[in-house]
Structures are given as structure tokens and as C-alpha cells.
Image (cartoon, rainbow, N blue to C red):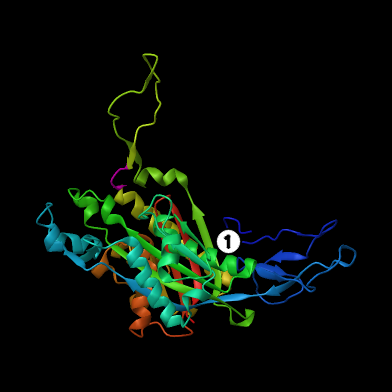
Amino acid sequence: MANASGFFTHPSVSSMRTRTHLPITVSGSGFLVSKRFSQRVLCSSLSSLDNHPSPSHYRPPRLVPSGCKLIGSGSAVPSLLISNDDLAKIVDTNDEWIATRTGIRNRRVVSGKDSLVGLAVEAATKALEMAEVAPEDIDLVLMCTSTPDDLFGAAPQIQKALGCTKNPLAYDITAACSGFVLGLVSAACHIRGGGFKNVLVIGADSLSRFVDWTDRGTCILFGDAAGAVVVQACDIEDDGLYSFDVHSDGDGRRHLNASVKESQTDGALTSNGSALGDFPPKQSSYSCIQMNGQEVFRFAVKCVPQSLESALQKAGLPASSIDWLLLHQANQRILDSVATRLQFPPERVISNLANYGNTSAASIPLALDEAVRSGKVKPGHTIATSGFGAGLTWGSAIVRWR
């Protein structure tokens, strides 16, 4: 299992009558290492030495080291484009004011027949095509979102729409703008610890449905999109997810949230002429996004560099070995501040914020896909990526593209 610091522990292996403890240590990269192997690994999948061992001749399964790597990407955005000039028609703002403070000039917004599931399916299909993996070969679908079309999650709907005929496990991960990074970590855990081969990780959000479009402090920031990657098992020598660092701090919720709000019921349910007090519960919905921009900025420029430095240390890599810095696309000032603190040159920082705004869990895979398809990110390039946002949550990962 993985703890909050990015390290893995492994339960002992049980037989019918005995319990055998495997010799396990933890490496500085944040992944589990068996003492039987000298490599920098990693969680491992288990395979049995015997098909039908008798209880008296039972031998515990052996550890089979497994790595994982990113092999395909895809993205999708709604057709409706809203420019800063468009926003200036409904709130007191203008293009220069928004661009100077955020770096954003346009954003895409779900409208008409658009749906979050539809965007996610489109992005996932493109990722599968690039990876040359058929939908029936997917073992797991992870949908990283805070704005599903259904209260109970969107991942199973995506699995069905893609045509994953083997009914693979599909579930949502809710961690706001950190969601995609946590999805990568989860994919690695399933591959290294569960024997999964092909995992589809999708980041998709439609925050426009929870924006107060009369509040110029927040409505200028957010857009809708979806991005996806295929993470595939590989030989340990070819491992492409080097390390990670993940955290959360519930005390920061007051700075960024969209809380449940109760609506008024039409009347009180009574029994024998007496009201039943707080029953039945009032119907609920979510409020619009509430954000203290200055506090979120302070949090990001402090915690993100620390997290990235921790991930680099676990990977045993200097910052100079990183080809690209890919951050959650929240605000250009945050991107610039983090890059400056880590001494990353501006030309090695991936940014598409101007075109899409803050797309929450979609922002990292969307920017990655564009960078890959434009030829900027090439096979073998090492990427330092970090997501951060509501919760508060934040996490970083050091990965190699293909």
C-alpha cells in the first residue's frame, strides 16, 4: 500500500495455515524495493510458482518486478470559445486586466450537447489510438474529476462508451486540480502492486457549471476540457515513472471550496400532527466556487517547489536533468514563480494557459498532449509535473515520456 509520503509498504503473503513475511525495504524514490533485487523498484506484482500447490507444499508467490510508462496521450475541448472580450460584456473587466494578472485570454465552456463524459471519451480514444492499445485491452479506467455528470461518478460510463468489453474496473478520483497527478500515482500502484497492464488515466472537469459568472475574481479563470494518457506495464529497466510526492492539508479548505448548500423544502413532514424536526433532509446542491486568490497563490508558490524538489530527490535526479516543467495551468504568475524558484528557464516550461484557462484536473494532460503532438515533448524526455488546488491537495511526479 502507498502512504501519503509516496512510499510503499507490502503486506505479508498468507497461505492457508502460515504467513510468510517478504524481505522488503523502501527506496528513496518513493517506491517499494525487494531485497532480492538491486534495482530502484518499485511495487511489484505477484505471480504464483505453482498452479495448484497443495497446502503441505505451499510456496509463497515470488515478486516479479514491474515498471510502468506513459505511451499515449489525447485531449478534447468544447467548441464554445469565450474570450476576455466576451467576459467584458457581462462583468466589469477587460482583456488587458485579465491577461496581465492571469495570462489567460480565452477559455472553452461546455454548452449545448457537450458533456464531460463525451469530452473524456474523445480524449481517451485519442490516447488509445496513439498508444496502439485497443479498448478491450484496458484493465482499468481512472477518471480524475471533481465535476462528474453523475453524482456516483463518470468512469463506468466512459468504460462503456469506449467499448471495453471485458468490464474492467473503472472509478473516479476526486482531488480537484491535483487529480491527474494522483491518477498517475494510482495507475502505478495498480500496475506494480496488482498486475494490471494497461491503465487509462483521464483528467476532465467542467468547472464552468460551478462558476459565479458575475464574480470577476473567479469567472475569468476557469474553463472546461479533458485530457488522457495510457500508462502501460513494462520491464523494470524501462520504468518511466521515477518518483512522486503527494500531500494534503484540510485546513486550507477555507481558501478554495464549493460547498454543499441546502435548499428549503416545500413543507414539513408530520406524524400525528407533529413535525419531525430535521427529517426529511433538505435537498442539496453545490455553491459556486469560492476562492481567496492571494492565499491560493501563496500556497502554490511555497508548496509546489518543495514538492518538486522532494520528488527529484527521491528519483535521484538533479533539476538540470529535467527536459520540461509541466505544472497545473492555474495562473501564469504561479508558473513563472515556481520556475524561478527552481531555476528552470522559461523556454523549458510548458504553458497553454492563454488558450484554455484553468481546466482543473484536465490541465496537465491537455498541455502534455499538445506538447507531444506539436513535437515539443519527444520520446525519452523527462518531465517534472505538479498539480495543486482545492482540498488543499498537491502532488508532484517525475516521469519519462515513452
Q: Which of 39 and 238 is in front in this view?
A: 238
Query: What residue did someone put label 1 on?
Result: 6
Q: Which of 344 and 308 is in front in this view?
A: 308
Q: In which quarter of the image is the N terminus?
A: bottom right
- Identify whether 150 is placed above or below 317: above
Task: Residue 191: say if magenta.
Answer: no
- Identify whether 230 is placed above or below 144: below
- Identify whether 40 is placed above or below 333: below
Task: Residue 288: say if magenta.
Answer: yes
Residue 168: x and y, percent?
Answer: 53, 66
**Left of 362 or right of it: where is 104?**
left
Residue 249 visible in this rendered orientation of the protein = yes
| Extreme-right residue of the structure | 56
**Left of 315 or right of it: where is 173?**
left
Residue 131: x and y, percent?
Answer: 46, 81
SS at badge 1: loop
Local crowd at mark 1 within 10 Å, few (<14), some, or many (≥20)? many
- Magenta-highlighted residues: 286-290
Image point (32%, 42%), residue name: 285
Residue 31 found in image quarter: bottom right
Image point (36%, 23%), residue name: 269
Residue type, mark 1 in image: Gly
Residue 105 visible in this rendered orientation of the protein = no
Residue 214: x and y, percent?
Answer: 17, 48
Residue 53 found in image quarter: bottom right
Residue 92: x and y, percent?
Answer: 11, 52
**Left of 338 or right of it: where is 18?**
right
- Identify whether 275 is placed above or below 377: above
| Extreme-left residue of the structure | 89
